[in-house]
Image: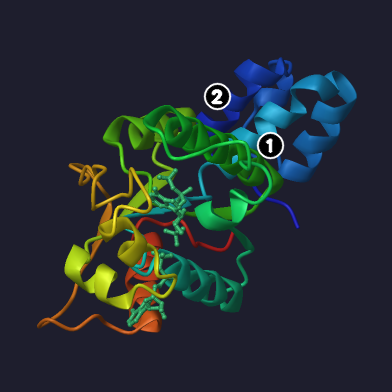
């Protein structure tokens, strides 16, 4: 498969790859450029690849309370993307805390570091050609904004699961809200720790007439947004 690059992207990429003026001529295909780039300047190929991919790859970043449905929606979205031929990978806060982030707790600075690491991993996934779906409580606006700033422009899609705390608490599949209410877990988001609602999110997920739509319908909402913004176009 080969792509023909728009002139402005070609010029932008060539500034970073150090390609010759001759090579900058538009109409050059990606396969020709790739070969040329690898031969001429292998070290910079990564940037070029990244720059190209970033036009198309979003990073969906779900945030909200525990039990708001982040992980369920992340799975549903991943399946939906897969059915459209798009590879994705879910970075789930709860899971990452068993491995990559097992040294972190829930103090504000630990949560900051948690989100920073997830942003860095998302960058690597984008570089590898995957859509990254992050599912984290991520309660602080500044941490989410820092994550947005570290990713390629316009590729950070913040999805706010705007579910009432009462609904999340009533689900309590892990029994953690009960423990937090009893004072047995301290610093619990929504109980005795803050959650700062987004001011500038791309997508807001809400109940309709007091009912939470099915995960597949919510995934459809996210996919529609991504399609509308041209993220899922086939090259
Ligand atoms: N004090 C406290 N506050 C909030 N959550 C707690 C806490 N202690 C443990 N847990 C469990 O950790 C999961 C959230 O981890 P995250 O990495 O998403 O949190 S954060 O983004 O760093 O705020 C969260 O689960 P999910 O929301 O399902 O991922 C909880 O199961
Ligand atoms: N759209 C939905 N409609 C009804 N129940 C849901 C929906 N999404 C999630 N749930 C249920 O809510 C609970 C918490 O979902 P989960 O995805 O684990 O939340 P989080 O990842 O935010 O902690 C689960 O029992 C799940 O089955």
Tell me, yes or no, if residue 38 can be seen here: yes
Q: Nearer the viewer, residue 120 or 173?
A: 173
Name the spot of residue 230 as percent of width and height, x first.
42, 57
Label 1 and label 2: CA atoms lie apart by 12 Å
Q: Quadrant of residue 25?
A: top right
In this rendered view, identify the residue nearer to me: 146 or 100.
100
Residue 118 location, quadrant: top right
According to the image, what is the colour scheme of the structure?
rainbow
Q: Is residue 57 above or below residue 206?
A: above
**10 relative to 31 in the view: left or right:** left
Q: Residue 183 in the image: state x and y as whole percent.
A: 30, 52
Q: Residues within 10 Å of mark 1 (few under 14, many from 20)?
A: some
Image point (48%, 76%), residue name: 76
Label annotation for residue 12 = 2
Element type at marker 2? helix
**Image position, residue 117 (x, y; %):** 57, 35
**Which mark identifies residue 49?**
1
Residue at screen point 85% across, 35% down = 35
Q: Kindly indicate the quadrant of the structure image that contains residue 211.
A: bottom left
- What secondary structure is marked by label 1? helix
Q: Residue at x 12, y 81 (%)?
A: 210
**Looking at mark 2, is its residue's CB closer than 8 Å to ligand 1?**
no
């Amino acid at each position: 498969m080969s792509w023909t690059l728009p002139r402005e992207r070609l010029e932008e990429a060539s500034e970073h790859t150090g390609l010759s003026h001759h090579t900058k001529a538009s109409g050059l295909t990606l396969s020709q450029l790739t070969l040329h780039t690898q031969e001429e300047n292998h070290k910079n190929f990564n940037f070029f690849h990244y720059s190209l991919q970033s036009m198309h790859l979003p990073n969906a970043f779900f945030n909200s309370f525990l039990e708001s449905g982040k992980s369920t929606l992340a799975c549903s979205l991943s399946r939906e993307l897969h059915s459209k031929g798009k590879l994705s990978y879910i970075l789930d806060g709860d899971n990452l805390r068993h491995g990559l982030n097992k040294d972190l707790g829930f103090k504000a600075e630990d949560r900051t570091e948690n989100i920073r690491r997830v942003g860095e991993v998302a960058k690597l996934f984008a570089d590898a050609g995957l859509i990254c779906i992050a599912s984290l409580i991520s309660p602080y606006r500044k941490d989410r904004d820092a994550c947005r700033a570290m990713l390629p422009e316009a590729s950070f899609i913040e999805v706010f699961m705007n579910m009432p705390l009462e609904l999340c608490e009533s689900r309590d599949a892990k029994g953690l809200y009960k423990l937090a209410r009893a004072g047995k877990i301290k610093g619990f988001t929504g109980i005795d720790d803050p959650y700062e609602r987004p001011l500038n999110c791309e997508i807001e997920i809400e109940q309709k007439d007091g009912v939470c739509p099915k995960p597949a319908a919510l995934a459809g909402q996210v996919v529609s947004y991504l399609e509308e913004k041209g993220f899922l176009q086939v090259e």
